[in-house]
Amino acid sequence: MTIGIAVFGAGRWGVHLIRNFLNHPQCKLVAVVDPHPEQLQAVKTRFQLENNVILAQDWSQGLELSEIDAVAIATPASTHYQVISAALKKGYHVFAEKPLTLTYSESIELCQLAEKQQRQLFVDHTYLFHPAVRTGKNILSQGKLGDLRYGYATRTHLEPVRPDVDSLWDLAIHDICILNSWLQETPVEVQANGTVWLPQNPPQSDLVTAKLIYPSGFKAFLHLCWLNPDKQRRLGVVGSQGTLIFDEMSKDAPLVLQHGHLEYIDERWKAADVSREVLPIEKAEPLAEVCAEFLDSIDNNIPSKISAGNVGAELVKVLCALDESLHQAGKLIRCDKS
């Protein structure tokens, strides 16, 4: 079965989707839709698209094209609800860039619509397909860290600065996604505080610090900033017997198990069994795995067990609670109240 697909959005992430769908033998790229003609021309030139690949500037026009089975949406988050809803009502399967929407109620509505239409709604949470994240999940499930204590994550860079959402909505979803997968639970309470430096209308938080509290009592602390030239993509989970560290910026050792614990000897706490283990991970492009999972989901007409719409909705629920806390000066917010 060859699946015809239209990619909506030919920006920074959209071009990666175009490349992967072009390279997949099960897929036929039918159209690329983007409001900027220069972007469409750049894509046509970069990928040497054949003349039968339609280039359109209006997404509503794109939904009327023939030969389309699915649409991949890489447009600004503020447009997701409208575009995804229209695509599902047209009977198309939908691949959506994260976040699914900007409100939990809209995300749930889209999940219900996909079920009603018997179409697959898939959200691009690329890290769930990262070999290091998959390996890390296995390490945690084996109990190698002992009793889990807390987690931390830092995600910083100097750009891009998004005009449609703040650094919380732009960056936090990645680390929450990884932590939820590793812990096999979702936060029940959250806190967030933000700082605004750049003049934008409306004002957007350029720096956000956040706390996630899980049902087990596990707590995670996030540092998110898009005004920091010290680019970091580092996440850790600390247990009684060691720390599991995913450092995406480390080419040689992206996943490390730092062994060690404290023992009380001679009336002093002393470090014991300290060692560093670089964990082997398979080589694979996560986004290629993402696209393949989506196409398999369509082929079998079964929701993905890894990143279906409901996974995206749960993450939006947490983000909405964090956003509420951010706008209430760090008030502790229950996620089920968002």
Image (tube, grey):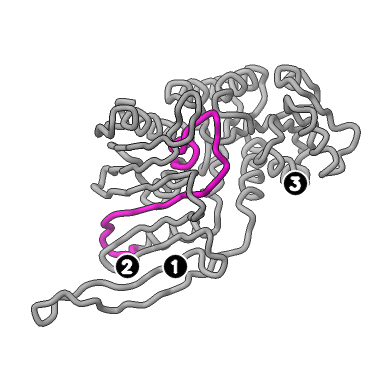
Q: CA distance from mark 3 to mark 1?
A: 32 Å
Relative depth, front residue between 247 and 144: 247
Q: CA distance from mark 2 to mark 1?
A: 10 Å
Q: Which SS class for mark 2?
A: strand
| Residue marked by disc 1 | 256
Up-down: is 169 above or below 219? above
Q: Nearer the viewer, mark 3 or mark 2?
A: 2
User: In terms of secondary structure, where does tag 3 sit?
Assistant: loop
Relative depth, front residue between 292 and 254: 254
Hey, what amino acid is under mark 3? His
- Point out residue 129 in the picture as x, y percentages from the top left corner: 55, 51
Which residue matches tag 3? 24
Q: Is residue 13 left or right of residue 245?
A: right
Q: Residue at x 37, y 70 (%)?
A: 258
Please say whether residue 171 is one of the residues in the magenta stretch: yes
* Residue count near mark 3 (Cα–Cα under 10 Å), binned few <14, some 14–19, many ≥20: some
- Quarter of the picture containing the N terminus is top right
Instruction: Please report whichever mark, 2 or 1, sits nearer to the chain's N-terminal start.
Output: 2
Name the residue type under label 2.
Gly
From the viewer's perspective, is residue 42 above or below residue 266? above
| Labelled pair 3, 1 in contact (Cβ < 8 Å) | no
Q: Nearer the viewer, mark 3 or mark 1?
A: 1
Distance from label 3 to label 2 (Cα)?
A: 40 Å
The image's mark for residue 242 is 2
The answer to which of 165 and 69 lies nearer the viewer is 165
Q: Amino acid at mark 1?
A: Val
Q: Residue at x 65, y 21 (%)?
A: 87
Percent position of residue 328, x then y: 29, 27
